Image: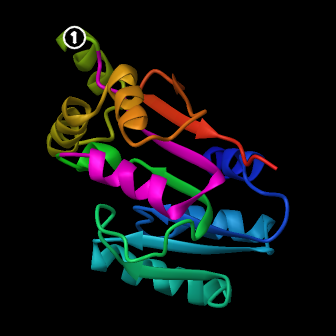
Amino acid sequence: TAFAESVIELGPHGAAKVLDVGTGTARIPLLIAAKCPQWQIWGIDLAQNMLQLGWQHVKNAGLEQQIFLEIVDAKKMPYSDRQFQMVISNSLVHHLPDPLPFFHQVARVLQPQGAIFIRDLIRPVNVEAMDALVASIGAEYDEQQKKLFRDSLHAALTVDEVRDLIEQANLSDVKVYQSSDRHWTAARAWQD
């Protein structure tokens, strides 16, 4: 919910085409669509099983005319240059062995004044910090889930690495910052 609220705050105030990269089961587009009926949202993912759940969620909400889900590779998007007024993504980047092509695609499909809201895990500064974060997720998680979380933290980027990727992709005026004990955020508001 907090992610969706930040997207709405930074995004265009009128009609807009928004791209959610790594949409999964489309929970974020559903939250956004409920508050921004003037937005059309494309949710893309490579996980067909996640999108099947997303398609069902969209259908159940009656939002098939507002939310469009597609199997698309974030590194090779089929969309036109400057097609979207906003690009968002939550917890995708750490899954990409080389995230630079993703950032290049964001720069290509986004309008020059377009808004950006990308959030992902941040790599801890050392093993002790990683151990503390893994320990903090709670007893309700089994050892396999803790291992997956540790692997995700290990694959995550630092704020400086994200800034470097944003710069290489020629995305200007994007603020990159640590937004929690386990996340970084790259954000740019819609520029009228």
Q: Quadrant of residue 40 in the image? A: bottom right
x, y percentage for residue 147? 15, 38
Q: Nearer the viewer, residue 157 or 54?
A: 157
Q: Quadrant of residue 161 in the image? A: top left
x, y percentage for residue 38? 80, 74
Q: Secondary structure at mark 1?
A: loop
Q: Nearer the viewer, residue 23 or 77?
A: 77
Name which residue lies at 28% across and 12% down. 125
Residue type marked 1: Asn
For residue 131, above or below residue 17: above
x, y percentage for residue 107? 47, 52
Q: Which residues are magenta?
A: 98-124
For residue 102, above or below residue 42: above
For residue 189, above or below residue 50: above
| Apparent side of residue 34 relative to residue 150 in the rendered image (left or right) | right
Name which residue lies at 38% across and 48% down. 103
Name which residue lies at 29% across and 69% down. 73
Residue beneath disc 1: 126
Circle 1 packing at 10 Å, graded few (<14), some (14-19), many (20+), is few
